[in-house]
Amino acid sequence: MSTATRSLPRTIGAHAILITYTVIALFPVILVVMNSFKSRAGIFGAPLTPPTPKTFDLIGYATVFGQGDFFHYFQNSLVVTVASLFFVLLFGAMAAFALSEYRFRGNTLMGLYLALGIMIPIRLGTVAILQLMVASGLVNTLTALILVYTAQGLPLAIFILSEFMKQVSNDLKNAGRIDGLSEYTIFFRLVLPLVRPAMATVAVFTMIPIWNDLWFPLILAPSEETKTVTLGAQLFLGQFVTNWNAILAALSLAILPVLILYVIFSRQLIRGITSGAVK
Amino acid sequence: MGSLKIENVKKAFGPVEVLKGIDLQVNDGEFVVFVGPSGCGKSTLLRVIAGLEDSTSGRVLIDGADVSVTPPAKRGIAMVFQTYALYPHLTVKNNMALGLKQAGTPAAEIERRIKIASAMLSLEPYLERRPAELSGGQRQRVAIGRAVVREPKLFLFDEPLSNLDAALRVNTRLEIAQLHRRLKATMIYVTHDQVEAMTLADKIVVLNAGRIEQIGSPMELYNAPANEFVAGFIGSPKMNFIDGARLGETAKTIGVRPEHLTVDANSGAWKGTVVHAEHLGADTNLYLDCEKAGLITVRIFGVYNAEPGATLYATPDAAKTYRFGADGKVLR
Ligand SMILES: Nc1ncnc2c1ncn2[C@@H]1O[C@H](COP(=O)(O)OP(=O)(O)OP(=O)(O)O)[C@@H](O)[C@H]1O
Ligand SMILES: [Mg+2]
């Protein structure tokens, strides 16, 4: 950083703002994790204090692992998220490549149509989706969820990726064509690696809402077999008594996989930014 | 092996016509340079030849065979791009090998060709490096090497030197000239650098707004430009154009190159004042504001001392003065 942009008051100001924001953003997460290690009395008695030897209790985790098939729910969530993510990235990138690379009739219109999904929430179509799934016998399958989430994630993915793909050097693609690479090879081997940072961004934006979603699992796949973590955690949310220990423990556990995925993608993000580009 | 014929090629992007009927014959082993102002369609024409862009109408024949529907990889061409366009994830060696591997060339043959090409372009020390670990000049040499190993009938260069600094440009220009001499291959080269065009070309094609203005050897274009555009485009500094009426001539415009004017302190055809003088050592460019001819450039070989404000007389060499009609064509 040059000295011209580094004055002490400004540095302090910037850090103060960033720290405040971080604290606000992390507060609920820390609260959840902290309280998940406390006894029920501890949670209600002093919700803001970290667990002390007196209040420390693993009862929540014991319940989660003892009751219900939580490991299975986790697996479901992971399968749905990873599979949807895979399809969103694959189809999104392919559609974006076609839209940005080829001139064909209706190109702009198609782009607009595909981007429209960003503005229209997919939940408006829940009833129709449910009817569709019933008709095709996909209710209570993970496939139903994967299909819906893929559709939900595609518009934003195509929108972001096609902007990035337009910036990939035409000369590079043409060099590949002259060397006899197929359009698929050009796409997978030349273009995709260069838009990896954008792919990682899209992955993060797509992943979080899918992992956290309660709506579609509840409607399309509420069976014991296909429950996701968010839905599974509802088990402890009773009409009269709520098992807060278990809920907090379940939520704390649910943070872990997304965190891991996020770390993987953000590393890609950084590597993409720092790797040598065409010129 | 390696002739090219272009017949009435037109190219339009939507309603915009970029190439308006190009006819061109390139003989085997020729070095042809396309020049023209920015946006005149040089790259587009090159891409049509390469097959990266379909022409709207017309035919492209390589070695007598119509290649209009042949994909780029099967046309027997190789292309070098302005931005190098090396594959960032491959080593120098694999960058050169990729096209051959795709074409199913045996490994030993690939090895042999890479060896020859890398020796020719002094790339041996870098074969295991990636493009990101090379300098600009080295990258461009790799790009040229990638073209050489394909042993194409036709080399296509799209402004290969414009991203290099001046010194490197001279070196690489020399290398390309040597390459042409050694391989005896047909080469088509796009540039808007005068010097590159004049020094490399057997034949220069001057393009303007999607049309060919003139085709000829560098000296033909210099000595006998067909029209005002070519006369102004070839030669540096640019030819002086003087309104014929001001000089009492019947021609619309009179053209005289800066180097075909002589100056004298006491007498001459056009009296003028020195506006600015550029001293380049080997020669001196004087800008004179003349009463009769307006602002003209005079190029004097060697050192010439002239202060702005001084009065000088310029005299054109009558044998080397060009006369242009109202349509811009040269009058003979
Ligand atoms: N894909 C495209 N779509 C629409 N117009 C295009 C496209 N490619 C080129 N053009 C237009 O065609 C014209 C010629 O472009 P071209 O790239 O051939 O110019 P050029 O002579 O190579 O210029 P330069 O010297 O600047 O490289 C330009 O006016 C350009 O705007
Ligand atoms: Mg160009």
Image: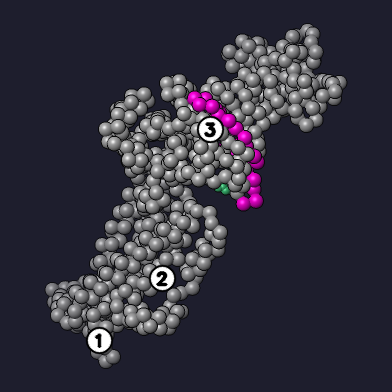
* N-terminal-most mark, 2 or 1: 2
- Image quadrant assignment for residue B139: top left
- Dot 3 lies on which element? strand
Q: Are marks 2 and 1 on the same chain?
A: yes
Query: What's the chain of the residue with tag 3?
Result: B
Q: Would residue A131 be counted in the magenta stretch?
A: no
Disc 2 to disc 3, C-alpha distance: 52 Å
Taking depth in this image into account, of A36 and A185 the one nearest to the observer is A185
Query: What's the chain of the residue with tag 1?
Result: A
Q: Nearer the viewer, mark 2 or mark 1?
A: 2
Taking depth in this image into account, of B286 and B199 the one nearest to the observer is B199
- Dot 1 lies on which element? loop
Q: Pinpoint residue B148: horizontal percent, then vertical percent.
A: 40, 30
Q: Are marks 1 and 3 on the same chain?
A: no
Q: Nearer the viewer, mark 1 or mark 3?
A: 3
Type of the residue with mark 3: Leu
Taking depth in this image into account, of B204 and B186 the one nearest to the observer is B186
Q: Pinpoint residue A100: horizontal percent, then vertical percent.
A: 49, 54
Q: Is residue A183 above or below residue B187?
A: below
Query: What's the chain of the residue with tag 2?
Result: A
Residue designated by label 2: A152
Whether the residue carrying mark 1 lies under 8 Å from ligand 1 is answered with no
Residue A249 visible somewhere in the drawing = no
Residue designated by label 1: A242
**Which residue is painted at 77% across and 25% down in the image?**
B324
